Image (tube, rainbow, N blue to C red):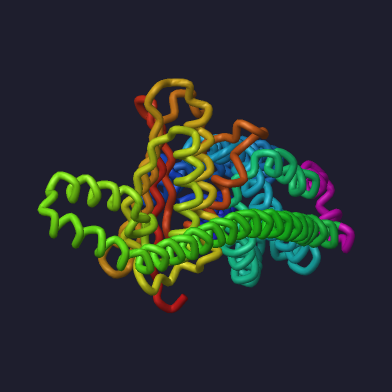
Amino acid sequence: MKTVDTLMILLFPFLDSLPFTLPRYWMFKDKLRISFRYVVLLQLLLASANSAAFYYINLGGYAAAAQWTTLLRYTFMLIYMILGFSLIKDTFPKLMFTYLLLLAWSFFVYGNANYIESRFFWDFSGIHPYLIYNLARIVIYLITCPFLFRFFRHTIADALAINDHDMWRYLWIIPLFSTLFGMLYCTTEDVYAYASWQFLVSRYLMLFGACYVSYLALKILQNSRRRIQLEEALKYANRNLTAQKKQYEGLTSHVEEMKKARHDLRQHLAAVQSYIERDDRTGLKEYIDLYKSELPPDTLELFCRDNVVNALVSYYAAQARADKIQFEARIDYPDPCPVASTDMTVLLGNLLENAVEACRRDSSGSKWIKLRIKQEGSSALLILIDNTCVLPVTFQDGTPLSSKREGPGIGAASVQEIAQRYQGEVQFEQQAGIFRVSVFLQLLQQR
């Protein structure tokens, strides 16, 4: 066996696996059970074992290799798939969706390489069985890389950020059919089939069909979720307007009462003067106490100077106190704040509404909500909400599941998407009868 042929045999399994397994781990690098560098090392070790096994079957000659190559390929393909599902902490549909799309890409590369080899270099491949096939795979992979990586980095990455259990239950099936279609040629022993235009077209239909249909499905889903988010924003905006209207009415009433108090001040001063002239200290004290009790409050409740945030917090504070829920808020809101008012309305509205509803369902004696908003340095905003919650909450991947529908709640998903938009994060947890939400937002001035 010539040196170049030996090198091509050893390289063959590496080109089978690494170009298509490592991008999948990179997409889920934040959800790996071990460090990404250890994943790379593990993949290299597994590819080396595959390479050794492939070299061994080729010692029996090309006929023996042709007989066992497909079985060896699918055996290690199964091992790679099981390993991927074990090392990545995410749901089965998401993992299978990305696995099948990358598998469709690998079949596209293999298919084009098979076509080029069998169509144009069949005699040369008889002398060097794997040289043309490996070189063709490398070239086709490098040509398709920029397009597929862009597709995975944007469209697929955006989709993976959506935690919609019902959607993912069906979405992963889209690339499944394309992949099964592409596997039709994998077991054929007719080498001339690889040189046919039908075979080549099947590979293009398989890859671009899977990507295009997935793209359309994800776009439709994103538009649907955007519509839901707009409806959520409108709902909380209406509540915000209602709260601001009530605040304005309260302020107007307060001003009118102050005007009346100022108008009556002259008469009150005359009465005080009368008590002083009679040296009636007891009567003067009683009169002053009575006057103080009839004065309007000095100030209205003010949580912060931002009208939108203050109105929204005031609205839910009133809701909570009406249900005998103790409400406490300490807000240090930046002025100006780069976070859009619509985003803050949806985020705070969802969290405070959920907190009030959780307390309402609590039949125990003491019920309370504590809100903290503070700026961390000059580049971050921290929002903390704690509330009593004795009923157990079910979580899925760190997100609380809705009590009204199957899967995560729309409100929690909206909060997570807003946090991601500001390069932040959200943490939900329940401990000792207390539900805690922590939201971290980056205050990027260029927004």
On the question of residue 146 being in view, the answer is yes
Main SS of residues in magenta: helix
Figure quadrant of residue 143: bottom right
Q: State how many labels appear.
A: 0
387 lies above or below 264: above
The picture quadrant where one finds residue 192 is bottom right
Residue situated furthest front in the rendering? 278
Residue under the image location 57 percent in, 52 percent down: 414
Residue at horizontal 24%, vertical 49%?
Answer: 287
Q: Is 312 left, or right, of 141 in this rendering?
A: left
Front-most of 326 and 13?
Answer: 326
- Outermost bottom residue: 446
Q: Is residue 193 magenta?
A: yes
Frontmost residue, 255 versus 368: 255
Vertical placement of 219 versus 396: above or below? below
Instruction: State the image coordinates of residue 57 (x, y, percent, origin top left).
Output: 59, 39
251 on left or right of 117: left
401 vs 138, nearest the viewer: 401
Q: Is residue 230 above or below residue 164?
A: below
Residue, far top: 364
Q: Residue at x 29, y 61 (%)?
A: 268
> Which quadrant of the figure has residue 80?
top right
- In the image, residue 388 lies at what x, y percent? 40, 31
Where is residue 413? Give x, y as percent: 57, 48
Q: Position of residue 131 (x, y in %)?
A: 61, 62
Span of residues in magenta: 180-198
Query: Does the magenta portion include 14?
Result: no
Can residue 56 be seen at all in this image of the molecule?
no
Give the residue displayed 35% in from the left and 44% down from the top.
328
Residue in front for this viewpoint, 256 or 70 = 256
